[in-house]
Amino acid sequence: MSQCLPVNAKMSKAKKVLDEARETQNRELDLVEKGLTSFEELPGLFNMSNITRLTLSHNKISVINPGIANLLNLEILNLSNNQLAELPVSLSSMPKLRILNVSINRLVNLPRGFGAFPVLEVLDLSYNNLSEQVLPGNFFGMETLRALYLGDNDFEYIPKELGQLKNLQILGLRDNDLLELPREIGELARLRELHIQNNRLQVLPPEVAQLDLLSNKSVMKMEENPWVNPIAEQYLLGISHVIDYLKTETYKIIYNRHMQAGRSGPPPPKADKSKKASRIRA
């Protein structure tokens, strides 16, 4: 029950891990479930510039000290399952950061310039309180991104700039409030996994059929959406039938009509997320 330990005991536990890492020149720090509430309980951490992996998941950290950017060799940062409401601007300046996991937190916005990560390949923002309104202008400028996880948030729309992520292979958008996907999704030539289950989608852009989502290693999850009847019928037969149907002229007519009428008509209802853990305030 580390969360019940007094601060000194928690600090000594974490300090022991830091001291051992310094002595052994260990470049990977594992501080999972140490009952940490702030970076002040990790004295000297930001001077350990040789660290390549830092795991701080399952703690109670609410603020990331901007000094984390001093860890110039850090490649993997895992802060999932904490109590973060915001991220520091300095994070996106980290020159070697390849994997950032801040899922299962309480994020309601992202810092300006967040898309400036020079080499980021995997970004996990799932299970927070984010929407298209809070994405910084350069968010889709992360050309090195291979996997983007935005599931369990509050997105209704994904900006057309999504198409700029030319190296994206995995896109996770499940459990949002999505009403439509941008046609530019068809520009993601390397996409092999698309997760759009449990949204409010009624149609798919025909351009989805341009993607390679039917090979052995590909995954497309689209259940739990209020699809128009023709898509729902094809889905019962299998994903390949859906993809083939999206290529037809008949479907393009249905899609265009729906998009023209849908924006003026009432959207499907939102799911109730009031009891979501990320909404709870400490």
Image: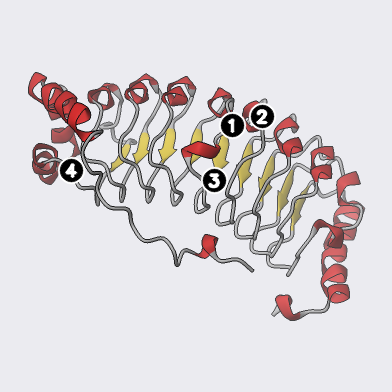
Q: Are marks 2 and 1 in contact (CB under 8 Å)?
A: yes
Q: Which of 263 and 208 is in front in this view?
A: 263
Write down the residue under mark 1: 136
Mark 4 vs mark 3, CA separation in Å: 26 Å
Q: Which of 29 and 122 is in front in this view?
A: 122
Write down the residue under mark 2: 113
Of pointers 4 and 3, the one earlier in the residue sequence? 3
Residue 213 is situated, as x and y percent measured from the top left of the image, at 29, 31
Residue 88 is situated, as x and y percent measured from the top left of the image, at 73, 42
Write down the residue under mark 4: 227
Residue drawn at x 30%, y 26% as measured from the top left: 212
- Quarter of the picture holding the N terminus: bottom right
Left or right: residue 134 versus residue 190 is right
Number of marks drawn: 4
Of pointers 2 and 1, the one earlier in the residue sequence? 2
Residue drawn at x 83%, y 62% as measured from the top left: 17
Of pointers 3 and 1, the one earlier in the residue sequence? 3
Q: Is mark 3 on a helix, strand or loop?
A: loop
- Circle 1 or circle 4, nearest the eye: 1
Q: Which amino acid does label 1 sit on?
A: Pro
Q: Do the residues labelled 1 and 4 touch (CB within 8 Å)?
A: no
Mark 3 vs mark 1, CA separation in Å: 14 Å
- Circle 4 or circle 3, nearest the eye: 4
Q: What element carries label 2?
A: loop
Residue 48 is situated, as x and y percent measured from the top left of the image, at 88, 45
Q: What residue type is labelled 3?
A: Leu
